[in-house]
Image: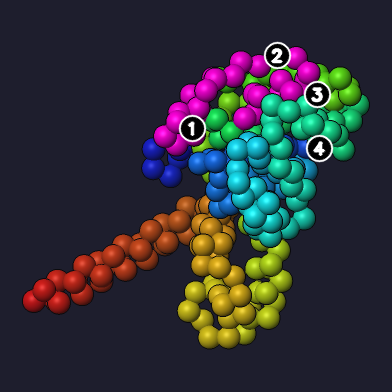
Amino acid sequence: LHDGRDKVTRVVIVSNVDTALLVMGLDHDFSVRRLERFVALARMAQVEPVVVLTKADLCADAAVRLAEVQQSVPGADVRAVNALDADAGSALADWLLPGRTLVLVGSSGAGKSTLTNTLAAAEVACTGANRTGDSRGRHTTTTRSLHTTPSGACIIDTPGLRTLRLDGDADQLGTVFEDIAQLALSCRFRDCLHDSEPGCAVRDAVSPERLANYRKLLREARRDSITALERKAIVQKWKVRSRAGRERAQAKRG
């Protein structure tokens, strides 16, 4: 969480969990870029990520979106379910094992509490209707809660998260963006930024949206590891670039 300029307060969502069920609705909530961020969060915390795409019964192209997610987060298990249907428990049975602890993470309205009730086989979590215009939830869940399932697993329902900033080692991003990490080995320059450098093996092989998201997450992961002097140098560099840009624009206006 941000608290003023360059100040960050770390908030622990949960601890001592085995698996993170990354819940995302196949409606207006669907965003592959945000999902990449959530998978990175889980892997940086050394927690197994399982992507759970809810509202599959309401999505006409669920199979297409499922394939898109599988391509964007290689190595992660992905399931498309109807959170209201008891079959959702069967789809996630491999992780609902006795003594295992799972946490449900996702944005408000994704169906975490509905899925919690289905997996627990009881009405243990409050649920509410989403807004019709954008499918967003109304923050029905405001605290974390722990529940048990008939199989003996424990599940933790959490309040909705729309955005979050990563906190971890930049090198760990390679486990989420494996395609970029592998392609980067063939770049002409070892420190290639995959921007405008000649001989870049990444730029033409990866979608601009995915590459932009990778750069953004990389900046966030590195932000907390740089020294105060390095941060000051970066700020100064961008000030110089901004000043030069303003001067060029002024010269054109003439």
> Looking at this rendering, what residue extends furthest in the right direction?
98
Q: Amino acid at mark 1?
A: Arg
The CA distance from mark 2 to mark 3 is: 15 Å
**Residue 132: x percent and y percent?**
45, 31
Span colored in magenta? 111-140
Identify whether 109 is placed above or below 177. Answer: above
* Residue bearing the label numbered 4: 91
**Residue 99: x percent and y percent?**
89, 26
Q: Quadrant of residue 17?
A: top right
Q: Please rate how many residues cluster around mark 1, counting C-alpha atoms within 10 Å: few if below 14, some from 14 to 19, many from 20.
A: some
The CA distance from mark 2 to mark 1 is: 22 Å
**Residue 28: x percent and y percent?**
50, 41
The CA distance from mark 4 to mark 2 is: 20 Å
> Looking at this rendering, what residue extends furthest in the top direction?
123
The mark that comes first in sequence, 3 or 4, is 4
Which disc number belongs to residue 123?
A: 2
Identify whether 137 is placed above or below 140. Answer: below
* Residue bearing the label numbered 3: 154
